[in-house]
Image (cartoon, grey):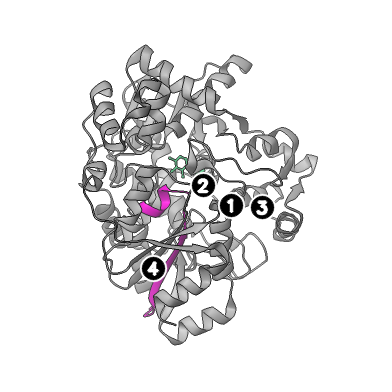
Amino acid sequence: MEVLYRSTRSNITPVKASEAILKGLSDDGGLFVPDHIPALEKSLKELSKMSYQEVAYEVMKLFLSDFTEDELKECIRKAYDEKFDTEVIAPLVEAEGAYYLELFHGATIAFKDMALSILPHLMITSARKNKIHNEIVILTATSGDTGKAALAGFAGVEGTKIIVFYPKNGVSPIQEKQMVTQKGDNTFVVGIHGNFDDAQTGVKKIFSDKELAKEMKEKGFQFSSANSINIGRLVPQIVYYVYAYVKLLQEEKIAEGEAINVVVPTGNFGNILAAFYAKNMGLPIAKLICASNDNKVLYDFFATGTYDRNREFVLTTSPSMDILISSNLERLIYRIAGNDAEKNAQLMSSLSGQGKYEITDEMKAGLADFYGNYANEAETAETIKKLYEDCGYVIDTHTAVAATVYDKYVKETGDNTKTVIASTASPFKFTRSVMDAIDHKYDAMGDFELVDELSKIANVTVPNAIEEIRSAEVIHNNICDADKMQQVVRDFLKL
Ligand SMILES: *Cc1c(COP(=O)(O)O)cnc(C)c1O
């Protein structure tokens, strides 16, 4: 049965997958959600014999039902190629009784590559299918990793331009260097005075500006989004949960049908929502463990049923999770409200008005699949150090938040179900924080000295993504105030 996409905020006429990918966000400000979650067609046993690309096709074809077989296979072929430094694309590493699903083997060494290497191809294909001749302008707010992955994906892609806004003082030195050295005439990178939420709010405002949209259209442009609210990002993320499960099955670490737990270091709630969708497709997942850093708005939400962003924004060593408004949570809220757009819209309007909302007890019952907890800075650093000392495996700060929360979960519940931890970034992307956690003696070293030192102690070659920026020239040095973002966009597009 064809999957169509509805808005979380009003009862629009459902749109096809390609239209939802092109638009990014529904006109009413809502997020697109599938009208039903399709069940896996192939058995887990059959899937266990497949490559990453083949599993990707089996999963994605069910959600992107208006793509032809040729179109989708072509997108997958172009996305999951030598840009990844391993043929298996997403390897599993066993350490201290858990399975780390390494999602950082793509071009920019963070898990955003898993979806952003395919999104440009899905978008170009969607434009062709819908006979769109406008140039597509990708507008993106980033907490660090989305920006570079989107730039790498869209750079040089004909018929597109990409503008990335990042919080000037809210990303790691390596993350910033990766973005400001991005080549490609169609790319534009801007640091803003403000945090990620300011950047994201600014982008959403630009998207919903009707006057601007009209001017854009006259000049032959239209906006789309590479943020994780785009279903073209969400759907490719479901793939690796299915892949991880069937690889464990193939390696006889689990029996067919045996349930696993999944732990996800969470910011905007996109990655864990993909795991939830995988579960709803029939993948045997028991608990979805949502790990937060000191910005623990999600932990509080799971504990109390109240989502409250009125609190201090904390800059942590896991900057890609420094988020107080988890955009993708809206898709879950809509669902636990019984797919009731009106009810969800009320809650979201309370979020933008009072900065908070409270769900009913009935809705709370819909959260039973989830467990939430958080890790503070000291705990996160301790986990990196301990794992390294115990087994020589070095994980990044985001993954360490997840590993810490997993530890707390096991202590609290005694649940020994086999567990996959989403490993969302290479430690080379957050070298300073990682090395500092292992030993303070590294504090005095320069960024790239640290890279070489990490390579030595972890016995891992320095990834290409890091080698590239060692001597790369800074191309983008634009900075603006959060309330000037629209003007920056106008200037870039010469409106
Ligand atoms: C984006 C990101 C996250 C958070 O993922 P969400 O889908 O936003 O929850 C976690 N870790 C890293 C390294 C990231 O880049």
- The image shows residue 192, relative to residue 37, as above or below, that is below
Q: Are marks 3 and 4 in contact (CB under 8 Å)?
A: no
Q: Is residue 461 left or right of residue 493?
A: left
CA gap, disc 1 to disc 2?
8 Å
Task: Identify residue type, mark 1.
Answer: Ser
Secondary structure type for disc 2? helix
Task: Identify residue type, mark 3.
Answer: Tyr
Numbered tag placed on residue 270 in the rendering:
2
Q: Earlier in the sequence, mark 2 or mark 4?
A: 4
Residues in magenta, as a range: 131-148
Task: Identify residue type, mark 2.
Answer: Gly
Give the percent coordinates (x, y) of residue 376.
Answer: 57, 28
Give the percent coordinates (x, y) of residue 309.
Answer: 69, 47
For the point 41% across and 71% down, the residue is 137
CA gap, disc 4 to disc 1?
23 Å
Q: Earlier in the sequence, mark 1 or mark 3?
A: 1
